[in-house]
Structure formats: C-alpha cells, structure tokens
C-alpha cells in the first residue's frame, strides 16, 4: 500500500505539468491566466464613455471565448473567470467591491457548461453569437443579483433592464462573432505549437 | 441533438431572454407604481424621473447640507425633503400645477407653484413615502404617494 502511494507520488512528481488544475496542464493554465489578465486589463483600458450598458462585453466575452476556443478543456472558462475576477478587485474596477468577482466568475463557469452543450464548436459563428450573448446576459443578471444582495430595491434595478438586456445580448454576440473568427484562424496554427 | 438544432434552440432562447427582460421590467415597474414603491414623475406624457423612499432620504440629506452651507436652519426632519427641492432635482420647472396621486383609492391632490412651499415628502418604513403639509401642522395629505404628474 505504502509502495503504491510512493509510486503514485513519484509519477506525479515526474509529470507535475500534465494535470495542474481541473486536469489542465501547467502550460495551459498559464495561458488561461494570461487570457484572464487580458480580460481585466482590456476592461479598464477600452472602457468607453459612450453610456451604453454592456459595451465591454465585446472584448470581455470575446477574450473569454477565444481562450476557451484555443484551450478547449473543462475548467478553462472558470480559471479565466477567477483570474479576471481577482484582478478586477485588485484594479478596483466596478462599484460592487469584492462581490465584483462573481460578475467575472459566473460567465466563466457558464462558458464551460455552454461549450459542452454546443459540442465545443466555438469556431462556428452562430455558436459564437449564442454563447457570447448568453455570457453577456449572465453578467447582467449577476449584477442584478448583486444589487439585490446589496439591498437595492428590485424596482430600481428593473428600470431599464429590458434595454440593458438587449444591449448586453447584442454586444456579447458581437464579441462571440469576433472570437469565433479568431478561433477559426488561430486554432490550426497554434495546434502544432501549443501543448494540449 | 445536432449542432444546428442546438443553434436554433439557442436563438429562440435569446429571443425569449430579451422579451422576458422587457416583460420583467414592465411588470416590476407597474407593480412598484401600484404599491407606491416606485413613483414616476411624469411631464409631457413622459417619465422624467423615478422616486422611491431611498431617493427621498438621500435628497433630504442633500437639502439639509445645502441649507447648512447657506447658513439656513431648515426645519425638515431626517427623512424629509421639501417637494420643491424634489421637483428641482427632477428637472421640473415652469409648471402650471402638479397633480399627486396616492396608492389605492386616495384622492388626487392638485398643487400650484405657490402651494408647494410648505409641502414635504417623508419616507415611510415600508419603502414608500408620504406627502405632508408642514405649514398645516405636519398634516399627512397622502399616506403613500404613487404618481406625480406635472402639467405645463
């Protein structure tokens, strides 16, 4: 029994990079961390004063889907969500304080589930439209849920919800389309060089 | 199920989500207006602002600070704000009269620009707010305000 444990431990030590987290290797985990960082950085670099709710979804959901499309493993979305959520708190983005992390983690987790439902075909434009829009809407829904947790009256949260939902869906879909196009072009080129 | 079928189901879901969001907004707003928790200020048949008990408390604090800065004492309580200050904050000016409706069967009250001097709005404990006449011994005119209509 002890010998078996020792053998298992030595096998783990020989290949520590093969299954770093969620059965994802260390190299892929680092790449996903890079995508998570890009999401947070893009959010405060490209935030435009255009007064349209959800416009950040274009690059937020775009990068999230691009990361998942290039590293199609379960848990990839969650890792990017956690990294971008932690960084969003560190950068002081948003008005929700530490609860802001949920706004990043929820779309990440949902992406992992939706990718399975759509058979990981994230390079398809229509799949990109649907997943991008759903992720963006889940972000809006999380904001509403956080508002309820923070004791903001539901009636006030509901004002403009329809318009915000429509814009979130449109911008999320746009991000999904961009991601699908990039995945289609990048995936064959990276397949040979990236360890999967 | 093939990917194409899943895509069709996904698009239908998106349509449902957007439609459902608008429906949820309308239902919540209508419910909020009915029970006096979300009070619309209507001018030119358009809603120019929404008020609730939280906004009334916040405006009350702002008015007190402004009075303090101006060296005036101001006799409004902690959860009270003058109607004139609220209308000014909502961008309402140059009106002929305002018509304030209450939740339930209470009567509508018409007030001209000269009548609103002593009128205050004060927040209730159930997320609604009342209208009272400060000049008339703090008499409550409307227990739960539901709508403020501004006539030019």
Image: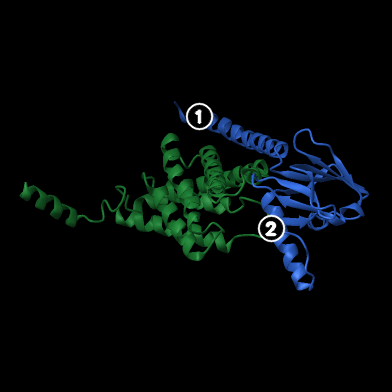
Residue B102 picture location, percent across and down: 78, 39
Residue hosting label 1: B4
SS class, disc 2? helix
Q: Is residue B110 left or right of residue A147?
A: right
Task: Indicate the chain on which mark 2 is placed.
Answer: B
| Quarter of the figure with residue A32 | bottom left
Instruction: Write the residue at 69% across / 43% down.
Output: B37
Residue hosting label 2: B58
Mark 1 vs mark 2: which is more N-terminal? 1
Neighbor class of circle 2 (other Cα within 10 Å; few <14, some 14-19, many 20+) is some
Quick one: A83 or B1, which is closer to the camera? Answer: A83
Chain rendered green: A
Task: Indicate the chain on which mark 1 is placed.
Answer: B
Instruction: Write the residue at 42% across / 43% down.
Output: A112
Residue A23 versus residue B20 in the image, above or below: below
Residue B105, can we see it?
Answer: yes
Chain rendered blue: B
Residue B79 — which label? Answer: none
Neighbor class of circle 1 (other Cα within 10 Å; few <14, some 14-19, many 20+) is few
Instruction: Write the residue at 70% across / 53% down.
Output: B55
Residue A91 versus residue B102 in the image, above or below: below
Residue A75 picture location, percent across and down: 37, 46
Residue A58 picture location, percent across and down: 57, 51
Mark pair 1, 2: CA separation: 52 Å
Q: Between tags 1 and 2, which lies in front?
A: 2
């Amino acid at each position: 029994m002890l010998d078996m444990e020792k053998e298992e431990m030595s096998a783990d030590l020989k290949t520590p990079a093969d299954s770093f987290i969620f059965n994802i290797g260390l190299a892929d985990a680092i790449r996903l961390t890079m995508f998570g960082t890009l999401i947070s950085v893009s959010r405060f670099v490209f935030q435009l004063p255009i007064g349209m709710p959800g416009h950040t979804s274009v690059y937020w959901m775009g990068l999230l889907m691009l990361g998942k499309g290039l590293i199609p493993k379960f848990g990839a979305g969650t890792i990017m969500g956690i990294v971008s959520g932690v960084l969003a708190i560190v950068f002081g983005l948003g008005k929700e304080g530490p609860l802001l992390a949920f706004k990043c983690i929820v779309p990440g987790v949902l992406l992992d589930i939706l990718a399975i439902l759509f058979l990981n075909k994230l390079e398809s434009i229509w799949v990109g439209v649907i997943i991008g829009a759903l992720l963006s809407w889940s972000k809006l829904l999380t904001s509403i849920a956080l508002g309820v947790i923070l004791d903001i009256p539901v009636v006030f949260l509901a004002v403009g919800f329809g318009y915000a939902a429509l814009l979130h869906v449109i911008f999320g879909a746009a991000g999904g389309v961009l991601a699908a196009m990039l995945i289609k072009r990048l995936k064959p080129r990276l397949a040979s060089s990236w360890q999967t | 199920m093939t990917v194409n079928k899943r895509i069709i189901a996904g698009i239908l879901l998106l349509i449902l989500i957007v439609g459902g969001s608008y429906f949820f907004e309308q239902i919540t707003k209508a419910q909020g207006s009915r029970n006096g928790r979300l009070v619309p200020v209507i001018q030119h048949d358009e809603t120019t602002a929404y008020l609730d008990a939280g906004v009334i408390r916040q405006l009350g604090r702002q008015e007190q600070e402004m009075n303090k800065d101006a060296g005036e004492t101001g006799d409004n309580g902690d959860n009270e704000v003058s109607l004139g200050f609220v209308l000014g904050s909502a961008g309402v000016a140059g009106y002929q009269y305002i018509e304030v409706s209450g939740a339930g069967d209470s009567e509508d009250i018409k007030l001209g620009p000269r009548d609103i001097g002593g009128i205050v709005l004060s927040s209730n404990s159930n997320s609604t707010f009342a209208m009272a006449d400060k000049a008339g011994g703090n008499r409550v005119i409307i227990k739960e305000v539901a709508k403020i209509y501004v006539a030019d």
